[in-house]
Amino acid sequence: MNLYILRHASAGTPKPNPELDFKRPLDKEGKQHCLYLANILNALRVTFDAVVTSPLKRSVQTAQLVATETGFERPIVLAEELAPGADFAGFRKLLEEYGWAENLLVVGHSPNIQQFLGGLLVPRADGLKPVPIRMRKGSIARVTLTRGPAVLSSVLDPRTVRALYMTSTKSSRRKTSAK
């Protein structure tokens, strides 16, 4: 399985009220980033068999924008195992449930999505929380899951995505001097 772990895109300042924060949408920058990321994934010919997201609005919007722009046509699944405060055991169970998928996209939040990535790459036998791996908002990591240990195949940071998008959309004709 190729597991794509995506931290939701920019959604502005967190709200102190948890009920309001649950409904916090992506901001303009976050929406634009999702479109850039989808463009890069399309250029890499990445398609998804399943898309699973946290039920919070900003994650759902991130999943919807990326999935739609990459041609994903099935329903997006909301999972509490990706919500803030979710634990690694629940995440592992979710992965087992989607073991049939060749390419799975999961969208979640900091810090748990970062701990899930760390737990896959550096399993801990002592029962403590996995070591988090830092991901900025809008970062996506590709992890190859086989029978052996998980392998981190790639990570795209939002700045890298923006740079790739900007260079890929410029004119491909070389500039020549006018004489």
Image (cartoon, grey):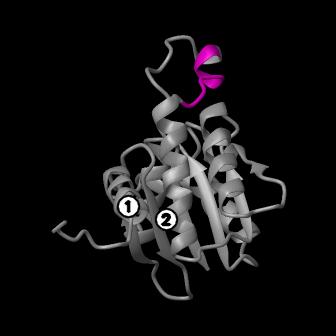
Residue 75 in the figure: left or right of residue 175? right
Residue 160 in the figure: left or right of residue 65? left
Dot in front, 1 or 2: 1
Other residues around mark 2 within 10 Å, as few (<14) / some (14–19) / many (≥20): some
Q: Does the stretch in magenta take in 60?
A: no
Query: Circle 1 — which element?
Result: loop
Query: Circle 2 — which element?
Result: helix
Residue displayed at 68% across by 80% down: 102
Q: Measure the C-alpha gap from mark 1 to mark 2.
A: 14 Å
**At label 1, which amino acid type do we have?**
Lys
Residue displayed at 78% across by 52% down: 76
- The residue identified by callout 2 is 40
Coordinates of residue 18 in the picture (x, y in percent):
59, 17
Quarter of the view holding residue 118: bottom left
Viewer-proximal residue among 70 and 105: 70
Magenta region: 20-26
**At label 2, which amino acid type do we have?**
Ile
Vertical side of 168 occupied by 132: above or below? above
